[in-house]
Amino acid sequence: MSPQSGRRSLDGSPGRDGRDEFGGPDKLPGSAPGAETRGTALATCRGLVKRYGRTRALDGLDLTLVAGAPIALVGPNGAGKTTLMSVLAGFSRPSGGAVDVLGARPGSAALAGRLGALPQDALFDPALSIGHQLRVLAQLQGFDRRAARGEVDRVLAAVGLDDVAGRRPTALSHGMRKRVALAQALLGKPALVLLDEPTAGIDPENARAIRELIAARETTYLVSSHNLDELERLCGSVIQLEHGRLVRHERLGAGGSTAPSAAAAPDGDELTLRLNDVPADAFAAAAVALDVVRSARQLPDGDWRLEVDDATRAAADLLALLAAHGWAWRHVGRGRSLEERLYGR
Amino acid sequence: MSLLIIARDELVRLFATRRGWLSVAAFVALWALALIYVVVPITRFLANSDESDMLEMVLGPLGLAALAGWPSPQLVVYWVIALYLLPPFAVLVAADQTASDLGRGTLRFHALRASRPAIYLGRFSGQCLVQLGLVLATLATVLVAIGVQTPDRLPDSLLAAPFVVLNLMVLLLPWVALMGVCSAVARSPRQATLFAVLAWIVVTLALSLARDAFGPLALFDHVMPGSEAGTLRGLADPATLALLPVPLIQTLVLLALGLFAFGRRDL
């Protein structure tokens, strides 16, 4: 919990369920995933390979995406995130292996309206109005003209852009264009939506609008991003790719990984504190003097990592300690952040 | 159904955009010049002469004597002009079947909702509708000219009009299909046009080498789109139908090539 964090523990906005703060319930986020019931396999890759010349962008990937909470897709540049999205969406043909999306081959017309995607850097035709282009896409999904008009109004309203249908893409800001692209991904309420860097390069207000839409969870999202804090707040599980291979696929929050994890300690035994101008030696001595705190060490970025016996009681005792000394604090969190889980600290 | 929606949208892309209107405006201006400075004056000249003799006198040395059998001289002039004016315009207009949308990623939005063959054939069909519109529009102006200048020839000209439309459309099909292939491997209409020019040069050179190696086989005369235009130029309407299989086969081959290329590339 943090005074300015805007996370669920304080202001009711959707929290990052993977690392509950200040003793909140440690559970996976609930969802209402459209036509697919929670836990249904939405996409399956078996030995998936994608080559670009001699480079193997995907190198024998085995993966199953299930319906439910948003799924984070992370990895360094060149890890294969966008390539995986492209293959799942049918934009790229796999070089080897098998892919199944909602029971169909990627790119198949059978997926029309069932699979949505926000491709990275894809733009609408600058010469035609937003409304016209979205209506054509809706009609391709099977809507008649009248229904298409209504559906376009619905998705534009969902992204907070009710009044842009008559405008051309060039009349919109980058963030608004991204939201329009997100609106097209939501046409027809698909069962699976692939979002490739949905908030990259856009201002905080537009980014928040997109995050709020994802957090509403009317479908299952696969979200690729380099913003780990954003993914941690939104997603219920994480897939990590490196060099085109799966290196991690685990739930966020409960610590129950489905693949070997690099996390050093179970979530419930650790607290992370961010303090303001507090003398390090004095705080460390005072903290370890508490009977529920086993150790306290300062991390390279200035945060404090405390191993505790009872996270809830320890947090309460620590807050009391900070108040008693008049020490300012900014954030108290339980467990390790997604960034720490993935890349250690 | 997807194919029809995409074909209809191709019409909108041409006629509802500034780029499209500029293309149409350029064509209209060109056609207006041809109508005012070629079709009407020649017709007026022929109308003031002993027409049947004069037409044969003019057409005979050009190897176009068979055209004297056409129902009106205006239609003859239109036919000859259209054979050479419409293909290059088709190349320019049809260059952007998929190239721009590929370049900016717009086709990804479509590919989520329609199969690639539907997208490709939809765009091709839309371009064919555009070409049909241009053929009908230009022919209509000529029929109006016939109605004004030589109204007694209008009924026969109207009867001949479907043959003219059919022939011109089949003549244009391989050009549109060729630009579909070029557009499928390019990322801009300019690049597609460049590819078409390069393809034309390469195929011409290859045919020349093939003729040197294998002799003047008839097959080599039918490889290039528009190869039958020279023959068509000298035929009266019913005789032109015999040449239709050549451009139709060219179109089918190019469509197959384009579908293959478009189906394999990353969007």
Image (tube, coloured by chain):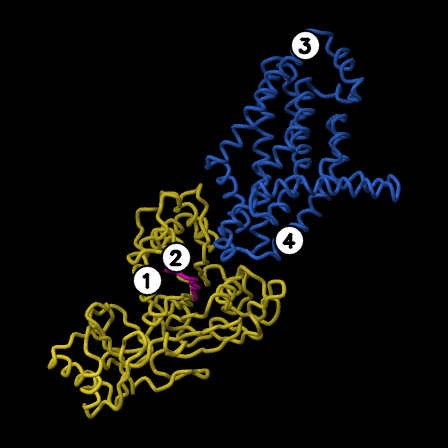
Please tell me if label 2 and label 1 are on a single chain: yes
Element carrying mark 2: helix
Amino acid found under the numbered disc labelled 1? Leu
Q: Position of residue A177 (x, y in %)?
A: 38, 51
Q: Position of residue B173 (x, y in %)?
A: 66, 39
Q: Give how far apart the Cα atoms at labels 4 and 2 are.
A: 29 Å
Amino acid found under the numbered disc labelled 3? Phe
Judging from the image, what is the letter of the chain drawn in yellow?
A
Q: Nearer the viewer, mark 1 or mark 3?
A: 1
Please tell me if label 3 and label 2 are on a single chain: no
Element carrying mark 1: helix
Magenta-colored stretch includes residue B84: no
Horizontal relation, residue A272 to residue B103: left or right? left
The residue indicated by pointer 2 is A182
- The image shows residue A126, relative to residue B113, as above or below, that is above
Query: Which quadrant of the figure has residue A188?
Result: bottom left
The residue indicated by pointer 4 is B261
Q: Give how far apart the Cα atoms at labels 1 and 3 are.
A: 73 Å
